[in-house]
Image (spheres, rainbow, N blue to C red):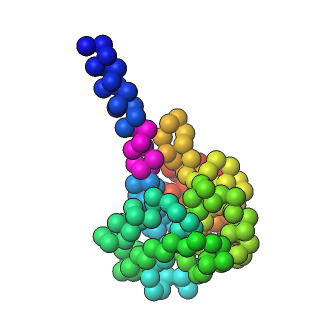
Amino acid sequence: MRTMRFLILSSALLLMAVTSPAQNYKLYTVFMNSFTRYIEWPAELNVGDFEIYVLGESPIVSELKNMAEIKKVGDRTIKITQIKSVSEIRKCNILFVPSDKSGLLGDVLTKLGPSSTLVVTEQEGLGQKGSGINFVEKSGKPTFELNNAALGKAKLKASSELSRIAIII
């Protein structure tokens, strides 16, 4: 009986460890959908498809594609593009930089220059290094940091509702 409980508990913990990152990406996608409503882009970026780029491989790609099938930004279609390198970055509304590409943040910011792209990252410390939004864990729960200086540099503005739930850096 004791061995059975141990096996069940071990299996449950292993399952939580395996599914937790995937659940985080589902939550990140919900957050990203909210960002489309609570970040203000300049008028010239409010036409055509709403473009979200993902640099490299990340489980968020499939989650974002699922979201894009059922959601819109106003009346705009959401288009998800996965790119392999910084050189492929083009005009987009949001650029997601997964943790395994975090070392490229400086190159990403240089490539984007003053463009109005919301850079979203997921590694501790990257909010302070220039991403507009950085996903972090606090008290074991996923949340996000908001860098108003980086948003201002990109000519983006976060609503007060978004600022209230973010960790401001």
Residue at horizontal 54 percent and vertical 42 percent from the top: 137
Residue 73: quadrant of the picture? bottom left
- The residue drawn where x is 56% and y is 66% is 56
- Residue 104's x, y, as percent? 69, 63
Q: Is residue 158 magenta?
A: no
Residue at 51% of width from left, 57% of height from top?
162
Residue 32 horizontal/vertical position (percent): 46, 62
1 vs 168: above or below: above
The majority secondary structure of the magenta stretch comes to helix
Task: Work out whether residue 119 or residue 80 is closer to the camera in this orientation and state it.
Answer: 80
Q: Quadrant of residue 69?
A: bottom left
For the point 57% across and 58% down, which residue is it? 98
The question of residue 23 being in magenta is answered with yes
Viewer-nearest residue: 156 or 56 = 56
Q: Nearer the viewer, residue 157 or 17?
A: 17
Q: Is residue 50 visible?
A: yes
Give percent across and percent down for residue 6: 34, 20
Front-most of 154 and 108? Answer: 108
Question: Where does the magenta region start and end?
Answer: 16-24
Q: Is residue 146 visible?
A: no
User: Which residue is outermost to the top?
Assistant: 2
Q: Is residue 44 above or below residue 118?
A: below
Q: Is residue 89 left or right of residue 69?
A: right
Q: Is residue 148 above or below residue 142?
A: below
